[in-house]
Image (cartoon, helix red, strand yellow):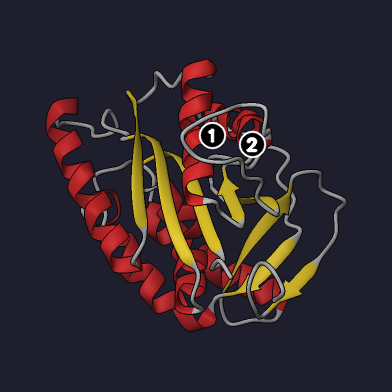
Amino acid sequence: MAKNHLMVVGGHISDPENMAGALMLKHKRAGWDVTIVAATAGEKGHPTLPPEEYLKMRLEDARASSEFIGANFELLPYRDGELPVNEESTWLMADLIRKYRPTVILTHWHGSMHQDHAATNEIVRKALFKAGLPAFRREYPPHSPRALLFPENWEDMEGYVPDIYVDVSDVFDDYLKLLKTHALMRENYASFRYYDYYEALGKMRGALAGFDRAVTLMYSHSMYRFERRTGLLLDE
């Protein structure tokens, strides 16, 4: 029987870890396979380094974080701030879905202030159609995940309403270590205090759900349901 597989798709390197690092650690330790996909490297985000120099740092950070989790890592061939929603990008994503055969996919909620995040959401949703349709003949056979969910990201909060609160108390210390594998978190050069935000968010969501630390997710079509889970994203 095939192992369960969690795929997390972000607009840039470090987005998957920010919004779903605790979930990746929790599921990896429960025996799931994990794949991280970055649609771009996010190489234009440093206030002083040129993109070609920051790209080297970002790629090293992606390697370190995927090794920390024990995850596969894939990077699409697009530049930061220039992510297209077209047949090429959709098929690249669909082929990765077919290749890795995820049980659950997590990606950005579409209500985002960042165009690459919104584009990633649209690419993933379009790719799910192509990945699951047998009439499309590709290198890998068709595959449809059992669930598409949206984790919480500070840039994607327009219309975001949590449906699921997941207890991540047991992995939260390692989640904070995972965040520090990225220079964005450990060197404090960004104008936004990413690390402080996600550390505090885990405590706040935990307080609301009655856990020590928690993260939230939203369904594709929110029914304003509240689920409080100590376990994984899918019941065995």
Of residues 102 and 187, the one nearer the viewer is 102
In the image: residue 228, left or right of residue 65? right
The answer to whether the residue labelled 2 contacts the one labelled 1, judged by CB atoms less than 8 Å apart, is yes
Q: For the residue marked with disc 1, what is the amino acid?
A: Ala
Q: In this view, does 90 lie above or below 35?
A: above
Of residues 44 and 99, the one nearer the viewer is 99
Residue 143 marker? none
Q: In this view, does 21 lie above or below 235?
A: above
Residue position marked by numbered label 1 in the rendering: 94
Neighbourhood count class around disc 2 (C-alpha, 10 Å): few under 14, some 14–19, many 20 upward: many
Q: Is residue 50 visible?
A: no
Q: Is residue 22 above or below residue 217?
A: below
Residue 174 percent across, percent down from the top left: 37, 75
Q: Kindly identify the residue that appears in the image at 41 percent across and 55 percent down.
A: 17
Residue 146 percent across, percent down from the top left: 70, 54
Q: Kindly identify the residue that appears in the image at 56 percent across and 66 percent down.
A: 2
Residue position marked by numbered label 2 in the rendering: 128
Neighbourhood count class around disc 1 (C-alpha, 10 Å): few under 14, some 14–19, many 20 upward: many
Distance between the alpha carbons at the discs numbered 2 and 1:
6 Å
Residue 41: quadrant of the picture: top left
**Which quarter of the rendered picture does the N terminus lie within?**
bottom right
Q: For the residue marked with disc 2, what is the amino acid?
A: Leu
Residue 211 percent across, percent down from the top left: 64, 81
Of the two numbered discs 2 and 1 on the same chain, state the one appearing first in sequence.
1
Q: Kindly identify the residue that appears in the image at 72 percent across and 56 percent down.
A: 162
Give SS at disc 2. Answer: helix
